[in-house]
Image: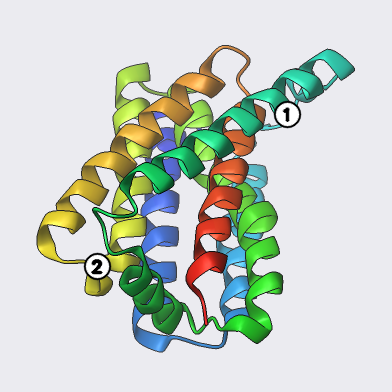
Amino acid sequence: MSEKKKKYGIIILVIASCIFMSFVETVIEPIYIVKSALKIVVFLFFPLLSMKKADIKIFDSSFKLNIKIIRNLILLGLLVYFLIIGIYFITKNIFDYSSLVSSLSDDQKVESKNFIGVAMYISFGNSFLEEFLFRLISFIELSKYTKRKISYIFSSIMFAVYHVSMIGVSFPLPLLFLSLVGLTAGGLIFNYADEKHSNIYNSWIIHMFADFAIMTIWCMHIS
């Protein structure tokens, strides 16, 4: 398969995956375990099969870890966690987090009795699935077949649009726009974090600990 076909194949794959999951989450709205299973298939298994069919190898020695790297990743994650928690306590009297959390809980069908399971899946599993699709596939792999700035922009915008498509009905317009800008910026930062070593460990740890912080805040308000 030519490099041009691989490039457009990756772009179509990512867009189709996002459209499908957005439709599932906003229109079909299945129970959480079904939605999670579908996301595993669409964001992980299907891309793996597609990459194999296109003869694109996505795992190599750059994914090896050692104790020093693990220690640095954990420190990075803790920094992200406490930064978000700190911002929350500074701004909690400015923004109405309780109503926002309530709205998100209703949208995601999350309540106190199933919160722990959902929080663990979001923090560990969901963060990996999204980093796999938006960083490994649509940034690291796509950058091999197109200009780096194109893969930077494409992966970041798809990351933002996918999330905004799910939360759009819950957010007022100004906050929705702010979320779009913030998520796009976050995607760019995640890409930069992964660029040097061409793996997703850095962005996954940042994403994971950011989700830990969000779940902590969510837990404070869920009833």
- Spot the residue most to the front: 93
The structure residue drawn at horizontal position 37% and vertical position 70%, both measured from the top left corner, is: 98
Can residue 98 be seen here? The reply is yes
Q: Which amino acid lies under the numbered mark 1 shown in the image of this protein?
A: Ile
Q: Residues within 10 Å of mark 2 (few under 14, many from 20)?
A: some
Which mark sits nearer the N-terminus, 2 or 1? 1
Q: Which amino acid lies under the numbered mark 2 shown in the image of this protein?
A: Gly
Q: Is residue 37 above or below residue 57?
A: below
Asked whether disc 2 touches disc 1, contact meaning CB atoms under 8 Å apart, the reply is no
Q: Which residue is mark 2?
A: 168
Mark 2 or 1, which is nearer the eye? 1
Quadrant for residue 132, please give it: top right
The structure residue drawn at horizontal position 31% and vertical position 67%, both measured from the top left corner, is: 167
The structure residue drawn at horizontal position 50% and vertical position 84%, both measured from the top left corner, is: 109
Q: Secondary structure at mark 2?
A: helix
Residue 21 at what x, y percent from top left?
44, 69
Q: Nearer the viewer, residue 129 or 53?
A: 129
Quadrant for residue 78, please give it: top right
Residue 54 at what x, y percent from top left?
59, 41
Quadrant for residue 203, please give it: top right
Q: Which mark is residue 74?
A: 1
